[in-house]
Amino acid sequence: MKPLPATLALLLLFLVASYRDLAVAADGGGGAVVPDAVCEAKCGKRCSQKVAGRCMGLCKMCCGKCAGCVPSGPFASKDECPCYRDMKSPKSGRPKCP
C-alpha cells in the first residue's frame, strides 16, 4: 500500500499545476489577476472628478491589464504606473488610460 501516498501526492501536484496554468491563461499570461473590487476602488478615486462613466470603464480596463496599478488620485501623475501611462489607443496613438 505504499504506492498510494505517492500516487496521491503526484495527483495533487498535477491538480495544483493545472489550476495555476488556468489562472495564468485567464489573465492573458500577463501580470497578476486583480479582483474587480480592487480596480473598482482605485478607479473610483482616479475618476472622482472626471466624467465617471467613460473614465471608470477605461480605468478599470487599464487597471486589469496593469495588475492593479492605477495612479493614486484624480490629478496624480501617471508616472506612478508606467504600464498605465504607456498604454495607447491603437487608432489615434493617444493615451488610453484616464
Image (cartoon, rainbow, N blue to C red):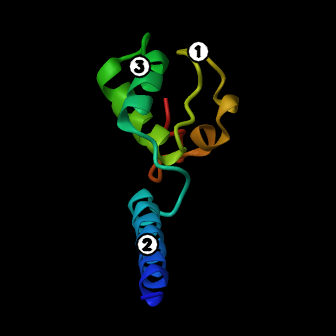
Give the CA separation, mark 1 to mark 2: 48 Å
Name the residue type under label 2. Leu
Front residue of 13 and 88? 13
> In this view of the protein, which residue sits in the foreground, 35 or 56?
35
Q: Secondary structure at mark 1?
A: loop
Q: Is residue 23 above or below residue 83?
A: below
The residue tagged 2 is 12
**Crowding near the residue tagged with mark 1, few <14, some 14–19, many ≥20 C-alpha atoms within 10 Å:** some
Q: Nearer the viewer, mark 2 or mark 3?
A: 2
Residue pushed farthest front? 1
Residue designated by label 3: 44
Give the image location of residue 68, x and y in percent.
52, 37
- Measuring from the top left, give residue 49's x and y in whole percent: 44, 10
Quarter the N terminus occupies: bottom left
Residue underneath mark 1: 75
Residue lying furthest right in this view?
79
Q: Residue at x 34, y 33 (%)?
A: 57
**CA separation, marks 2 and 3?**
40 Å
**Can you give x and y, in whole percent of width and height, for residue 14 in the image?**
45, 77
Could you tell me which residue is drawn at 34 percent across and 19 percent down? Answer: 52
